[in-house]
Amino acid sequence: MQYLGISWIQGSFATMRTHAERIKRLLTHSGGNMPDQEVKAFEPAFQSGFDFFVDPLLHRRTDEGRDEFRFEITEKHMNGGGGLHGGMMMNLMQAVLAKSVDQALNGAPHTLASIACDFVSAGRDGDVVEGQATITRKTGSIVFATGSIFVDDRTVMTANSVWTIEREGVAK
Amino acid sequence: MTEFGDRPTPVPQEPAQNIPAGYQQLDLYDPFEAYVGPVFQKANADAPISFEVEPRHADANGFAHPGMLLTFADTAIGNYVWAKVDWKPNVTLSMQAQFMGKAKIGDLVVCVPEMIQKTRAVAFVKGTFTVTDTPIMTVSSLWKMIGAR
């Protein structure tokens, strides 16, 4: 039971950091394949709900209009084999896509209709995961978005998604 | 490293307060599943798996967050596959989900998993997710047996 014994019961460095310390680490993280941009700082993408319950995801919109994300993997996000849990990985991907779609729609209500996720590689305890999303097409009722999440230069997950735009007073 | 076919010790969990009728609390082996759980299963390995939507699983409108539904899909189908392959270690390779409905706080989301095909290295698994028999999500997924070629 080594993989449960060492990492789960004793606790890791990443988990021992406070919430504020983790956000500070994400803000000062350098490396990865995002160009450094001093001008725009990251801010929490969500302040409540399930997104917040699973830990803070940081977001910034670059001057070129690209949405960028950062998240720190800690022990509670793990599977039994010591990797980032597949559900948490999809949850992160969904959050990256949702925030990007929200930005593209200026906050108009939208609903996830379909998502296809490929699990390209594993994430590990303490990794800083970065994410990016691209809006492929936006019509009057539908948004197509693709996203990827990665650790440094290594892709962890890629995904395609379809979102429906909700109309006020009209049932979905 | 765990030997093939050797099931480890479950993650310690609080006993669930409101176990749905006919279900038992499922032992979980992944810390993240225990963090978002509990989940429930009927008596045998082919039986439906469920979870009750709590406020912590919800978005601002009181509906189950799609990220939580995806997490539950990975948890429910993952545990189903694991039992089907005699506890051999495996990982999610890909998962596609379609959302045709919503679950609100207090709803019991039920997953009925189905093994479509199992090759030496990959399992092909479908899952139908319902709330009071109304479909809210369907999933198709691929699972890779670690080490198998």
Image (tube, coloured by chain):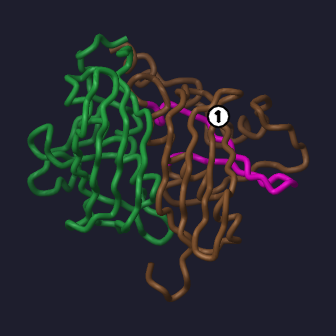
Residue B8 sits in which quadrant? Answer: top left
Return the residue nearer the eye: B130 or A53.
B130
User: Is A62 left, or right, of B56 in this rendering?
Assistant: right
Return the residue nearer the eye: A101 or B12.
A101
**Which colour represents chain B?**
green
Q: How many marks?
A: 1
Magenta span contains residue A75: yes
- Taking the view exactly as shown, the residue that stands out farthest to the bottom is A169
- Image coordinates of residue A42 in percent, x first then y, are 76, 49
Residue drawn at the location 38% of the way across and 19% of the way down: B146
Q: Which residue is mark 1?
A: A150
Residue drawn at the location 48% of the way across and 86% of the way down: A170
From the image, which quarter does the C terminus of chain B lie in?
top left
User: Is A82 left, or right, of B39 in this rendering?
Assistant: right
Residue density around tag 1, few if under 14, some if 14–19, many if 20 or more, within 10 Å: many
Q: Secondary structure at mark 1?
A: strand
Check the residue under mark 1 and report the chain it is in: A
| Vertical relation: B115 (above or below) A40 | above
- Taking the view exactly as shown, the residue that stands out farthest to the right is A39
| Vertical relation: B29 (above or below) B55 | above
Chain coloured brown in the rendered structure: A
Residue drawn at the location 87% of the way across and 54% of the way down: A63
Residue A64 sits in which quadrant? Answer: bottom right
- Image coordinates of residue B43 in percent, x first then y, are 9, 42
Residue drawn at the location 58% of the way across and 69% of the way down: A142
From the image, which quarter does the N terminus of chain B lie in?
top left
| Vertical relation: B119 (above or below) A99 | above
User: Is B80 left, or right, of A143 in this rendering?
Assistant: left
Residue range in magenta is A54-78
- Image coordinates of residue A123 in percent, x first then y, are 55, 29
- Image coordinates of residue B144 in percent, x first then y, are 37, 26
| Vertical relation: A45 (above or below) A19 | below
